[in-house]
Amino acid sequence: MNTENEYLEMANHFKELLDDKDKCLKLLVLVNHEIKKEVLTAYGIIRLLDREISLIDDMPCNIKHLIQDLRSHLSSFYDNLFPLPNNNGQD
């Protein structure tokens, strides 16, 4: 009977551990979602800024290059966050 109680205590302990890990995972999913929204917002703003700055004739080249570099970096980051599905049937 003592072994039965030990198994019950161990099972309860593992259930608590699993519940804690589940809470942490749910929080990480929410944080991940918020980060993705922020990256999408930043990417959209940089795209608009890049377009508007391209219309200004006397904008210093270094400013244009910095904005283009940031846009390119965020574009690559976006592609990593939201990869396109593989269309050739391979995983």
Image: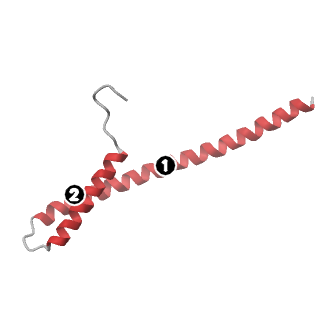
Q: Which residue type carries mark 1?
A: Leu
Looking at the image, the residue that sits furthest to the top is 89
Q: Residues within 10 Å of mark 1 (few under 14, many from 20)?
A: few
Q: Which residue type carries mark 2?
A: Arg
Quarter-of-image position of residue 50: bottom left
Looking at the image, the residue that sits furthest to the left is 57
Give the vertical position of 85 relative to 46 (above or below). above
From the viewer's side, name the closer residue of 73 and 51.
73
Q: Which mark is residue 47?
A: 2
Q: Residues within 10 Å of mark 2 (few under 14, many from 20)?
A: some
Q: Measuring 65% from the left and 46% from the top, which residue is drawn there?
A: 20
Q: Which residue does the numbered mark 1 point to in the structure image?
A: 30
Which of the image's four quarters has the N terminus?
top right
Q: Measuring 77% from the left and 35% from the top, which residue is drawn there?
A: 11
Closer to the N terminus: mark 2 or mark 1? 1
SS class of the residue under badge 2?
A: helix
Which of the image's four quarters has the C terminus?
top left
